[in-house]
Amino acid sequence: MHLNEYLPRRVNHGPWLTSYTLNRLRQLDASTEIVLPICSLGAAYSTISTVGDLHLPPLFHEALDDELKHRVVEQIYRCFPEHELSSLRSSKLPRLRVVELSPVTPAECDSPKVLAFSVDTAVEEHGPHLPLCTDTIQSYGVLQQLAREYKGVVPGPPVEYGQLTWGLPFGYSIDLTAELLTRYVTRFTNAVLDWLRPESLYVVDVHGSIVHRQAIVEGLQQSRASRWAFRWLHEPLAEFSSERGDQHAGGVETAFVEYVSPELLDADWWPHRIDDIAAGQMSFERAVELTPDLPRFFQEVADTQCNGIVGKIENYKSLDSRELFDRALDVARSDVESLLSGNPIEQSAGQQLW
């Protein structure tokens, strides 16, 4: 399914904007053209990224009707590259253009026993050292390992948009809203069922927002999928993240991405500038306080020059990246084994906030 043409191999490289860090994107010239492609499921990612300079993750024809497409695109323009509340919106920003590719019938594929995909917030800043698609990198690190271990598990195309708040004041982040995400997940799920006819679905994410996770589960419940499981892959990492105030782009996510591939971290920043990164981070408590008042959140970011991290990058020094990955992988193994064996599946969006 052409995933190797899409998933990043190194940071700040390639045609997909989500492979770049916030700092690198802030350096883009105003003449840079960013394309939002709308294409068919099954289209080769290499053919999608043939126009423009950089590309947002695609939206899929089969997951949209006219009204939903209008609202999703409108919401993306509202957020990207700088949110409508931002004082940075100006003619000097890169241009965003929507390009609709002609619908095509996807090639037939063997029906997988388990089709696995993520619904992550791939267009979300993750500080100066991690790419926007940090969540997707973590999810597919686990899903690709599952595919190596279990015959019949096939990673499918990701849904790369979701509900978020904290990234918006920093720019280059897209909040799809929970309502639109639920509708898109339902239609996307029905579309992949029609296309690939999998026996079951395994859907994951690592994004901390419980609103995002609940929207995914609701979308799956409203779809035609009869056998599926959803997993928040960071749920077993709570003692390393939630309990240490390390919620977003801090030590836990840095260690996890580094385990997947060290080339996905910006060497200009990591690891020798960890103290500089820590100097610009925001505490979890402060982010929670500011969340209900977005204009105030935007103003604080402008006044303090925060770098997008909510948490404690210093947490990295006490972490074992292999242990983090294995904890997420172990719960995913259990889920997949249940799907493959036909055992009952208990569905949950995860009860913790982070």
Image: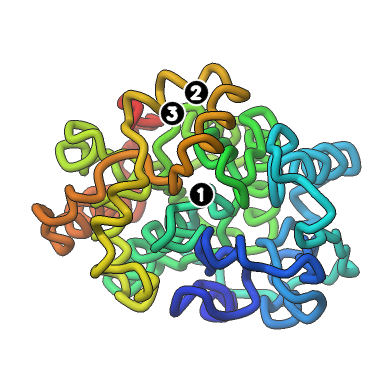
Label 1 sits on residue = 120
- Residue at the spot of label 2: 291
What residue lies at 49% left-to-right and 28% top-to-bottom? 214
Residue 39 screen position, x and y as percent: 79, 65
Label 3 element class: helix
Residue displayed at 19% across by 54% down: 330
* Residue 33: x %, y % from top left: 80, 69
User: Position of 105 compared to 353: left or right?
Assistant: right
The residue pinned by badge 3 equals: 210
Distance between the alpha carbons at the discs numbered 3 and 2: 14 Å
Quarter of the image with the C terminus is: top left
- Number of other residues with Cα within 10 Å of mark 3, as a class: few under 14, some 14 to 19, many 20 or more: some
| Residue closer to the observer: 344 or 215 | 215
How many numbered discs sit on the rendered protein? Answer: 3
Q: Where does the N terminus fall, quadrant-wise? A: bottom right
Report the mark closest to the observer, 3 or 2: 2
In front: 249, or 323?
249
Which one is earlier in the sequence, the residue at label 3 or at label 2? 3
Quadrant of the image occupied by residue 55 = bottom right
Q: Which amino acid, by three-letter code, is at mark 2?
A: Thr
Q: Give the SS element for disc 2.
A: loop
Mark closer to the chain start, 2 or 1: 1
* Viewer can see residue 307: yes
Left-right relation of 121 to 182: left
* Disc 1 + disc 3, Cβ < 8 Å: no
Choose the circle earlier in sequence order: 1 or 3: 1
- What SS does tag 1 mark? loop
Q: What is the crowding at mark 2: few (fewer than 14 residues within 10 Å), some, or many (at least 20)?
A: some
How much space separates mark 2 and mark 1, taking CA atoms?
A: 20 Å
- The quadrant in which residue 78 appears is top right
Q: As shown in the figure, which amino acid type bears the numbered disc 3?
A: Ile
* Colour convention of the picture: rainbow
